[in-house]
Amino acid sequence: MTPRRFTGLDTVRLPSDVNASLTYVAASYDAGTEKNTERFADLVPPAQTLTGLDWEGEGTGMSDPDLAEDGVITPHPGIMGVGDQDPERFGWDDPVAAVQIERIE
């Protein structure tokens, strides 16, 4: 399961001139709130429908307390192939986002 992955920027320089822009790339992070089982059955709906697969299961509908972790934010390793989520289809490499900031009047 990878329901608590996110991306973002922190402490980046902003453009100083009007109409100037800067582009930054952002890595993926794991919130550390739940173990990453990589099992579709552990995904909270509607995450299963976002996979594009014909999913028959109900999912947990909420976070499973048995999968809780200590909440330490770490770089996300991606889909490693330990569950039934195929890394070839659902995996990714960092960076996961490009953020362009443009100064306007």
Image (spheres, rainbow, N blue to C red):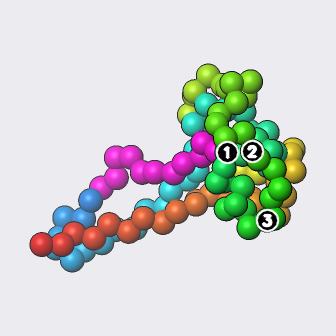
Spatial CA span between label 3 and label 1: 15 Å
Residue 74 shows in the view: no
Q: Earlier in the sequence, mark 3 or mark 1?
A: 1
Image point (42%, 51%), residue name: 9
Q: Vertically, is 57 above or below 18?
A: above
Q: Amino acid at mark 3?
A: Leu
Q: Is residue 11 magenta?
A: yes
Provide residue 41's location: percent of width, then percent of height.
80, 45
**Which residue is nearer to you in this view: 96 or 1?**
1
Give the residue at x 32% y 66%: 101
Badges 2 and 1: C-beta atoms under 8 Å apart? yes
Along the polypeptide, which appears first: circle 2 or circle 3? 3
Q: Secondary structure at mark 1?
A: loop
Q: Position of residue 91 (x, y in %)?
A: 74, 59
Dot 2 alpha-carbon crowd within 10 angstroms: few under 14, some 14 to 19, many 20 or more: some
Q: Quadrant of the N terminus?
A: top right
Disc sitting over residue 53 in the figure: 3
> Alpha-carbon distance for marks 2 and 1?
6 Å
Question: Mark 1 and mark 3 in contact (Cβ < 8 Å)?
Answer: no
What amino acid is found at the position of numbered circle 1 in the picture? Answer: Val
For the residues labelled 2 and 3, say whether their Cβ atoms are less than 8 Å apart: no
For residue 85, which quarter of the picture? Answer: bottom right
Determine the residue located farthest toward the bottom in the rendered image. 19
Q: Which residue is mark 1?
A: 44
Q: Which residues are magenta?
A: 2-13
- Image spot of residue 89 (x, y percent): 79, 65
Residue type at mark 2: give it.
Gly
Which element type, helix, strand or loop, lies under badge 2?
loop
Most common SS among magenta residues: loop
Give the mark toward the camera: 2 or 3: 2
Q: Residues within 10 Å of mark 3 (few under 14, many from 20)?
A: few
